[in-house]
Image (tube, grey):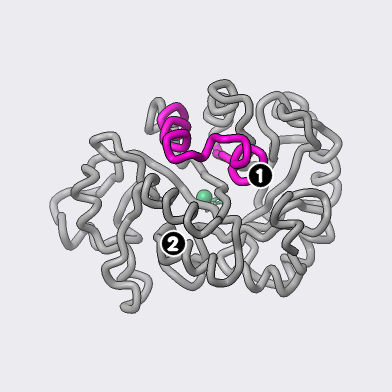
């Protein structure tokens, strides 16, 4: 398993902790990524967005309502968009209590804080640019932040960082801004469209129902912009039977809220 985690290559699928080990701790918090570390997972996925005053923070939804106490603290600020709050306001939020009292006081991390923590843990990052259409320039800003935290050196570029998005233009922009960064497109373009995706993305990352053997083979038949066989990471797989199914289909990685369940099922 160690070798697979290092290379994310053609053998058994690499398990990626989704929003951290988010089945066990509140998603996209330091608690969740530390939990993934404790369980032995180096690859972890997270979502990045931007505050009103231009800070990059980790949040899945485009509003703060589901995973923080924002409605209680700022009752008049509906619909509580990430982009309508300053970093200082967001820093006051409790991002743990909604999940369980054990995580009361857990914070919404900035990308900077998060990068420092996963560097300390020796973890690797599948970073999703979430709804980048709302945040013009977020590709450049994210790359700049990654660079200043030491995440764009050769060793990180080679095996520790992937940037993905549902937004193809954003993936393309990321590739154009730094052609050495490994990229992923979230979705399942038609097989007839894969050649055009292969110009700017190294991975095609579909939902598990779309990750059939035929589809995975079609992706594997192409080379991405880094000159290597394109890969497939699939999501969000939270049970053993589905994990075994996508493993049999030949995926390169499995993204899961319960990564230990996937590891037990696949050995990855
Ligand atoms: O990394 C795959 C997955 O995170 C994409 O969907 O909605 O969980 O961000 P979502
Ligand atoms: Ca995500």
Q: Which residue is mark 2?
A: 27
Q: Element type at marker 1? A: helix
**Front residue of this view, candidates 103 and 209:** 103
Quadrant into which the C terminus falls: bottom right
Task: Tell me: is circle 1 under 8 Å from ligand 1.
Answer: no
Q: Residues within 10 Å of mark 2 (few under 14, many from 20)?
A: many
Q: Position of residue 53 (x, y in %)?
A: 24, 35
The residue depicted at 72 percent of the width and 62 percent of the height is 2
Q: Which residue is mark 1?
A: 159
Q: Is mark 2 within 8 Å of ligand 1?
A: no
Q: Position of residue 210 (x, y in %)?
A: 72, 50
Q: Is residue 260 above or below residue 124?
A: below
* Image quadrant in which you'd find residue 32: bottom left
Residue 133 in view (yes/no):
no
Total residue callouts: 2
Q: Quadrant of residue 31?
A: bottom left
Residue 219 is one of the magenta-drawn residues = no
| Left or right: residue 85 compared with residue 19 | left
First in sequence, mark 1 or 2: give its number. 2
Viewport quadrant of the N terminus: bottom right
- What's the magenta region? 139-166
Q: Magenta span has 145? A: yes
Q: Is 207 rendered above or below residue 140?
A: below
* Residue 36 visible in the picture: yes
Task: Please tell me whether residue 259 is drawn above or below residue 87 in the rendered image.
Answer: below
């Amino acid at each position: 398993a160690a070798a697979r985690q290092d290379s994310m290559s053609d053998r058994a699928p690499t398990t990626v902790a989704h929003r951290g080990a988010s089945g066990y701790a509140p998603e996209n918090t330091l608690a969740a990524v530390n939990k993934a570390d404790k369980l032995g997972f180096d690859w972890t996925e997270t979502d990045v967005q931007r505050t009103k005053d231009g800070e990059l923070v980790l949040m899945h939804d485009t509003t703060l309502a589901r995973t923080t106490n924002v409605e209680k603290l700022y009752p008049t600020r509906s619909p509580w968009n990430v982009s309508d709050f300053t970093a200082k306001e967001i820093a006051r939020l409790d991002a743990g209590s909604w999940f369980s009292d054990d995580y009361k006081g857990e914070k919404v991390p900035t990308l900077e804080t998060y990068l420092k923590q996963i560097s300390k843990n020796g973890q690797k990052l599948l970073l999703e640019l979430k709804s980048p259409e709302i945040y013009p320039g977020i590709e450049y800003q994210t790359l700049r932040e990654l660079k200043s935290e030491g995440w764009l050196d050769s060793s990180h570029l080679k095996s520790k960082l992937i940037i993905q998005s549902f937004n193809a233009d954003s993936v393309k922009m990321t590739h154009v801004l730094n052609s050495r960064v490994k990229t992923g497109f979230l979705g399942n373009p038609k097989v007839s469209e894969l050649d055009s995706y292969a110009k700017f993305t190294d991975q095609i990352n579909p939902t598990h129902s779309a990750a059939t053997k035929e589809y995975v083979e079609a992706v594997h038949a192409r080379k991405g912009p880094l000159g290597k066989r394109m890969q497939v990471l699939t999501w969000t797989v939270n049970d053993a039977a589905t994990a075994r199914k996508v493993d049999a289909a030949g995926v390169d990685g499995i993204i899961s809220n319960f990564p230990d369940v996937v590891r037990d099922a696949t050995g990855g």
